Image (cartoon, helix red, strand yellow):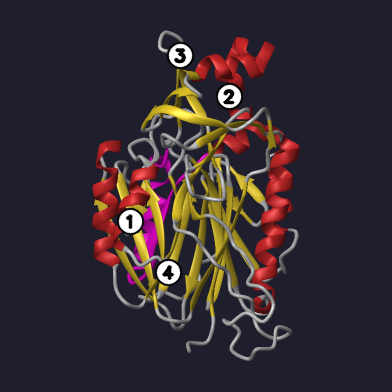
Amino acid sequence: METHSIHYTLANGWSSAFPAIDSAQTLILVFGPADWQAYTAAFNELIAHYAQAVIVGCSGYGAISNGEILDDTLIVSVTHFHQTQLRLATCPITSPAESLFAGQILAHELAAPDLQATLIFSDGLNTNGSTLIEGINSKLSPTTVVIGGLAGDSQHFTSTWVMANQLPRSQLACALGFYGNAIQFKTAIRVGWNPLGPERQVTLASGNKLYTLDDKPALELYKQYLGSRATDITKNSLNFPLAIRSKGKPYTLIRTPMVLDEDSQTLIFAGDIPENSTAQLVHVSATTLIDGAYKAGLELNEVIALNQDQPVLLLTISCGARRAVMAEEAGLELHAACSAFSKKVNQVGYYSFGELAPHNVKLEPKNSPYCATKDCTTCLATPTYGLCELHNQTITLTAIYEQSAT
């Protein structure tokens, strides 16, 4: 595997010449601002130069490149795989109601016995990430690693785009399949929060609308815990999301309140909230978010430590709400996340409207049956994954690299 990064600005053009590795096994990842029309010439150059490659990407609340946030910039990674085959699927998605069907269509087009991983990008304003992933998971093997994110913009919530071998488009979802035994996707996710109050049962909810907790109006309880900050709950909501624990699951998913309805005492979140789950109000700050990013980097580095002598593409998708909370300190989470890795790791990514990832890397215990040599000093511990889910206010790190096929 060979991987490079370049970037494009309106003022200076391309940072370097295009790497000469066009092929059907070349992946071009592109992340940039929602207002893409000013970059049309650059997109056309990229498409023309990499006529055989697979080109995918999306807009975000800033692009990410090797520990830096770059606005008004196209970030491009060019990765050539030696032993991995790629296949692209797309599906229009004009409203959140179409998300389940779109997920099923994308997964159906990619499903195959040798499918190892799938990378998803979808319109951030017309997609219900929870049901999109439900549709994908329903058609793919549970051993297939699924990661990705919803496209974002600069918190204007007006337009997002997805790119899939053509100029950027809104109202589009795409999925890229990676085939063969060589490809490796290792993922770590973290939030960084402190609890406020006890866990409560979700007694009435529908989709992303939360009505009652412990049979009491959800908004009333929110205001009770926020105290003086409840006078401007919309402004402060990013700092006080809910940690949702679905029935039978040992972990939580973060859900961010986006809209409140005083008349019905209802909260509307950026992601579905299942009835009979538990919900706990939590507090996030720049300090806790940076600490979460640092722990995600350490966790993932431990998994891939024996492979850092070869090229590794580190796909970083962090929530736009995290950037909003951290403001001018947002770059610190990227430096924290990268601090554990070697300089051979090539980091690219973006700030999203929702992160798609399996819920956590766990190292196998000593003497793991996955270790072919039964020698834990030389055998790479194998991570275990749950199914992919939608996350809010979460940083996801995915190391992508090739190992010798077995």
On residue 237, the disc is 2
Horizontal and vertical percent for residue 87? 32, 69
Picture quarter containing residue 96?
top left
Mark 1 or 3, closer to the camera: 3
- Which of the two labelled residues, at mark 4 and mark 1, occupies the earlier sequence position? 1
Q: Please give the count of numbered marks on the rendered protein.
A: 4
Question: Dot 3, how many residues are within 10 Å of its Cα: few (below 14), some (14-19), or many (20+)?
Answer: some
Query: Residue at the spot x=59%, y=71% of the render?
Result: 312
Picture quarter containing residue 377?
bottom right
C-alpha separation, residue under disc 4 versus residue under disc 2:
36 Å
- Which of the two labelled residues, at mark 3 and mark 2, occupies the earlier sequence position? 2
User: What residue would you read off at disc 3?
Assistant: 265
Horizontal and vertical percent for residue 248? 48, 49
Mark 4 or 1, closer to the camera: 4
User: What residue would you read off at disc 4?
Assistant: 143
- Which of the two labelled residues, at mark 2 and mark 1, occupies the earlier sequence position? 1
The three-letter amino acid code for the residue at tag 1 is Ile
User: What residue would you read off at disc 1?
Assistant: 136
C-alpha separation, residue under disc 2 versus residue under disc 1:
30 Å
The three-letter amino acid code for the residue at tag 2 is Ser
Horizontal and vertical percent for residue 70? 60, 45
Query: Residue at the spot x=65%, y=19% of the render?
Result: 225
Magenta residues span 35-61
